[in-house]
Image: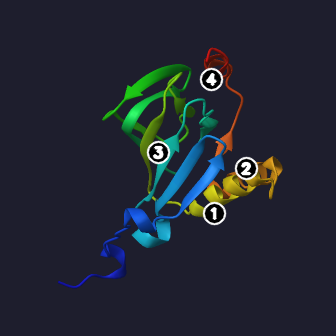
Amino acid sequence: MSFSAANQPVLVRAGEAETLQDGALSLITLLADSPATAGALTANKATLRKGSPGAPAHFHTRATEVFLVLSGSMRILLGDKVVTLGQGDFLTVPPRVPHAFAPAPGGEAEMLVVFTPGMVRFDYYRLLERVHRGEATVQEIKDSSEQFDNHYFESPVWQRELADR
């Protein structure tokens, strides 16, 4: 069987995946970026320790974001509601739907996160790690919103959720 560039399988061995620390209590394991999948998807694994603030309120304009909770439980902002997802729960968030996520209070969680269609995101995650290390600024994240299709905004609902922790 032969494969063209558009249907080339992507295999990422657990021990070979690049893992970034994007916050004091969170890790992102890079699985497949858009160029590797001929634009079909981008995938990572998010590991959120107890007390992690997770991802702030944001939306994407060009891709659906897909979540599968691998372990633990997550609190996720969807528009103006917050829902809890447990191990094995699956969620799709279409373009332009405001969302945010963090582990449930007092808990930890791990999620598979997929964007479809794919968009180049690995450099965005590397930027987050540089900000965490003090090697880049939050302004650089703001300046990259169009490039990485990550648009942050203030959500009173999500702020209340985080304050109640």
N-terminal label among 3 and 1 = 3
N-terminal label among 4 and 3 = 3
Indicate which label's residue lies in the foreground, 2 or 3: 2
What type is the residue that disc 1 sits on? Asp
Q: Can residue 8 be spotted in the picture?
A: yes
Residue 73 sits in quarter? top left
Residue highlighted by disc 4: 158
The answer to whether the residues at label 3 and label 1 have Cβ atoms under 8 Å apart is no
Q: How many C-alpha atoms fall within 10 Å of the one at disc 2: few (<14), some, or many (≥20)?
A: some
Q: Position of residue 158 (x, y in %)?
A: 62, 23
Quick one: SS at disc 2? helix
Rounded to the nearest whole Å, what is the CA distance between mark 4 and mark 3? Answer: 18 Å
Quick one: SS at disc 4? helix
Indicate which label's residue lies in the foreground, 4 or 3: 4
Q: How many C-alpha atoms fall within 10 Å of the one at disc 3: few (<14), some, or many (≥20)?
A: many
What type is the residue that disc 4 sits on? Trp
N-terminal label among 2 and 3 = 3
Rounded to the nearest whole Å, what is the CA distance between mark 2 and mark 1? Answer: 14 Å
Indicate which label's residue lies in the foreground, 2 or 1: 2
Residue highlighted by disc 2: 132
What type is the residue that disc 3 sits on? Glu
Pick the quarter of the image with the C terminus: top right
The answer to whether the residues at label 2 and label 1 have Cβ atoms under 8 Å apart is no
Residue highlighted by disc 3: 65
Q: Position of residue 105 (x, y in %)?
A: 53, 21
Q: Position of residue 81 (x, y in %)?
A: 52, 19
